[in-house]
Amino acid sequence: MKNKALGSSFDDFLTEEGLADEVESGAIKKIIAYQLQETIKKERLSKTALAARLMKFNPVLINRENLTFCGITFPDLETLNKTAKTIGSNMFEGFELTSKSVEIIRDYVMDKITIPELIHIAKEKL
């Protein structure tokens, strides 16, 4: 007997239960926490030194009229805002905002890549 999946996808289930945004946010935070731990290990930082570095972010310009963020074009204002919010709420020392990182988060927000693909990309960047 073949093993066939029954029902809808896990993403559909999370959406139906109203949990998709919460799970997505939690997954992104875990990825960032992992990257933060790796930065602490790699640079042998104390928590105090890390905290001091966290206050050194440069402002990021977002052009909502042209729907661009770091040179990356967005299909609509909702996607631009959701991507900016995701990045802004999860920034930490060691995270360098680049056009490529904005593009990756945008693609995740637009469901062009999955969480496993996002994790794979994040691990490759370390």
Image (cartoon, rainbow, N blue to C red):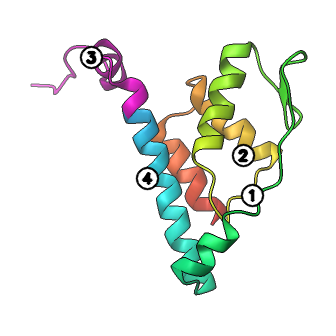
> Where 58 falls versus 99 (above or below)?
below
State the separation of the CA atoms marked 2 and 4: 16 Å
> Where is mark 4, residue-wise?
30
Which of the pair 126/80 is nearer the observer? 80
**Is label 2 or label 4 in front?**
4
Q: Which amino acid does label 3 sit on?
A: Glu
Give the crowd class for mark 1: few <14, some 14-19, many >=20 residues within 10 Å: few
Quarter of the image containing the N terminus? top left
Point out residue 109 in the picture as x, y percentages from the top left corner: 58, 27
Magenta-tinted stretch:
1-22
State the separation of the CA atoms marked 1 and 3: 34 Å
**Is label 1 or label 2 in front?**
1
State the separation of the CA atoms marked 4 and 3: 21 Å
Image quadrant in which you'd find residue 26: top left
The residue at 60%/74% (across/down) is: 50
Task: Please indicate whether residue 73 sits to the left or right of residue 116 in the image.
Answer: right
Q: Is mark 3 on a helix, strand or loop?
A: loop
Question: Is 126 part of what is drawn in magenta?
Answer: no
Please report contact status of discs 1 and 2: CB closer than 8 Å, yes or no.
yes
> Where is mark 2, residue-wise?
101
Q: Is residue 106 visible?
A: no
Please report contact status of discs 1 and 3: CB closer than 8 Å, yes or no.
no
Q: Is mark 4 on a helix, strand or loop?
A: helix
Marks 1 and 4, the one that precedes in the sequence = 4
Image quadrant in which you'd find residue 85: top right
Point out residue 36 in the picture as x, y percentages from the top left corner: 54, 66
Marks 3 and 2, the one that precedes in the sequence = 3
